[in-house]
Image: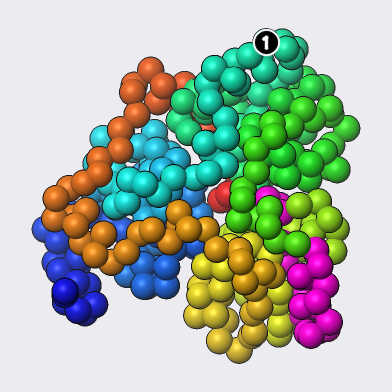
Amino acid sequence: MQDRQSIIEKINKLKKERNAVILSHNYQRKEIQDIADFLGDSLGLSREAVNQDADVIVFCGVDFMAESAAILSPEKTVLLPEMEAECPMAAMVDVDSLRKEKAKYPDAAVVCYVNSSAAIKAECDICCTSSNAVDVVNSLEKDEILFIPDKNLAKYVSFHTDKKIIPWQGYCPTHHQILVGDLLLMKEEHPEAEILAHPECRADVLEVADKVLSTTGITEYVKKSNSKEFIVATETGILHRLEKENPDKRFYAGSEYAVCPNMKMTTLQGVLNSLEKMEHVITVPEDIRIKAKRALDRMLEVGRSDIKEQ
């Protein structure tokens, strides 16, 4: 069994040899965040992959994130260290079921959250992130919106638009189990703390939150806020970054159970194996890639300067 430091040294050596960069999502293990060249959210990291003069992208996240990087950077080798790191919410919609639903609402625009597979993105009119979903929906001419796949984000959007939102019945299991009762108990213990919630949470959780923000929105807001304490209603992995970047502030998990097991599958040994063996290469068939990229590009045209990650 190799010790942690020797694994890290080997990773750094292979990174140089292969001209690779390591991208880590905010929900990854602490040690993965600490070795990453870039830390952030799925779409932002994929766009970072485009900007990097690298031949290899090691994406420490879940399957759809690596796919997004492959969609936007087809000339680069995108590696997902842990092939079983799948997104449960993205798996809650498949192409055949979506096509049947689209047939029921032929006049509806189909808006797809980036937390979805490339094949699903290819079936949609436009993508969105949690931070720009409202703007994307309101930018569309059609009054009916089929929103895929997160019913909680769809509900949040419905509160901020006059359009009819038809939600897919998917959800993030990790965010869905953050309960309003847990937040209220935490608030009793820390009455001065602001409650920050991700829009993948249930509607009653969002109602008690002081701010509803994407994970990037949370990191940016905390830096600027005069508050010293925060109750954070999202996956607990983000607390590591928040604590490192704001050592003078205190952070509390909205729920100790808000841990995504899929996000935690990637290990240091897994990253090393990925670089040593150049596995697992993520590719997207060209016909699907082109259609999926079109949906992403359309999103980026909506308030281009204001786009943030998912």
The structure residue drawn at horizontal position 58% and vertical position 49%, both measured from the top left corner, is 310
Please give left or right for residue 24 compared with residue 144 in the image: left
Task: Give left or right: position of 199 versus 62.
Answer: right
Q: Which element type, helix, strand or loop, lies under badge 1? A: helix
Label 1, residues with CA under 10 Å away: few <14, some 14-19, many ≥20: few
**What residue is shown at x 51% (from left), y 73% (from top)?**
241
Front residue of this view, candidates 207 and 97: 97
For image coordinates 37% across by 47% down, the residue present is: 84
Left or right of 120 in this view: 153 = right
Q: Position of residue 93 (x, y in %)?
A: 57, 30
Relative height, residue 259 to residue 229 (above, below) = above
Which residues make up the magenta segment?
A: 180-201
Q: Quadrant of residue 215?
A: bottom right
Q: How is the image coloured?
A: rainbow
Q: Is residue 101 above or below residue 170?
A: above
**What number of labels is visible?**
1
Residue 57 in percent (x, y) is at 29, 49
Q: Which residue is mark 1?
A: 103
Q: Is residue 134 visible?
A: no
Q: Amino acid at mark 1?
A: Ala
Above or below residue 109? Residue 248 is below
For this orientation, the residue located farthest to the left is 17
Relative image position of residue 110 (x, y in whole percent): 66, 23
Where is residue 91? Give x, y as percent: 52, 36
Quarter containing the N terminus: bottom left
Residue 203 part of the magenta-drawn span: no
Along the horizontal axis of the image, is 221 left or right of 96? Answer: right
